Image (spheres, helix red, strand yellow):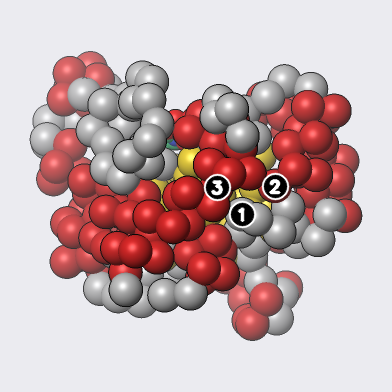
Amino acid sequence: MTRDEARSKIIFALDVDSFNAAKQWVATLAGRVGMFKVGKQLFTAYGPDIVRMIENFGAEVFLDLKYHDIPNTVAMASREAARLKVKLFNLHALGGYEMMARTREMMDREFPAEDRARVLAVTILTSSTEETLRDVGIEHPVAEMVPRLALLAKRAGLDGVVASPREVPLIRQACGDDFLIVTPGVRPSFAATDDQKRIMTPAEAVAAGADYLVIGRPISAAADPQQAVEAIVDEIVDEMN
Ligand code: C5P
């Protein structure tokens, strides 16, 4: 794997609360990481301008808004996300087959296949435990629900899932190779674990089959963030060659 291939797998989580802070991070890391993740906080505060700001640096965006609503509403919101030219966006697989399939149909109808936004499903949030699921009437263990929902997403025509690194083998087994897996919760060997629990290094996650890695604090909290990215790229390249 080349350094640029390794670099293109890194998605930097823009977990900041101001437009200017986001812009500074993009200026610092554009060209060094593959993509920037915009979540609910930044998007609620600044809207599509935050996406355009990132794209003006020539960088790509993962719009992490996790849509979950009636099929028509999610399909229409998804069209707007894709019109912003984001590279990835996501929705909750728990919204059901029709919600996901209608979204995929919208993508196929409105955008050219080669460069349309890719749609990811969130299966079960990693913050959920068996108890969380039982409280809402789901009696199956997390380990059963994750591949089940991933497979449902694949059948509905979605492009992949967001999953913890530990779940990658299970999902690959259920959904095959032609399915994107994006994993947060990775920690390079040099970084603190923070509040992440079931971690792997970025290199281990890529070796296990992850296509993209969402990484925040190991880069943002480093004394030299650009150098932290290069160190992560080194670790991935070493592992894969
Ligand atoms: O700073 P850190 O590398 O832990 O950031 C990881 C990013 O991925 C954060 O934006 C976090 O919200 C997100 N995420 C996560 N675990 C999940 C889903 C999303 O850490 N299961």
Disc 3 is placed on an element classified as: helix
Give the residue type that dot 2 points to: Leu
Q: How far apart are marks 1 and 3 (CA)?
A: 7 Å
Q: Mark 2 points at which residue?
A: 29
Q: Distance between the residues labelled 3 and 2?
A: 8 Å
User: Left or right: 168 with respect to 44?
Assistant: left
Q: In which quarter of the image is residue 177?
A: bottom left
Give the residue type that dot 1 points to: Val
* In the image, the residue with mark 2 has its CB under 8 Å from the nearest atom of ligand 1: no
Q: Which of 181 and 188 is in front in this view?
A: 188
On the image, the x and y values in percent for residue 210 come to 35, 59
Give the residue type that dot 3 points to: Val
Q: Residue at x 88, y 55 (%)?
A: 56
Disc 2 is placed on an element classified as: helix
In contact (CB < 8 Å): disc 3 and disc 2: yes
Q: Mark 1 points at which residue?
A: 33
Q: Which badge, 3 or 2, is on the more N-terminal residue?
A: 2
Q: Quadrant of residue 105?
A: bottom right
Q: Name the residue under label 3.
A: 229
Q: Which residue is drawn at 53% across and 42% down?
A: 228
Disc 1 is placed on an element classified as: loop
In contact (CB < 8 Å): disc 1 and disc 3: yes
Residue 196 appears anywhere in the view: yes
Q: Nearer the viewer, residue 72 or 94?
A: 94
Q: Which residue is drawn at 27% across and 36% down?
A: 199
On the image, the x and y values in percent for residue 183 come to 38, 48
**Image: 60 above or below 166:** below
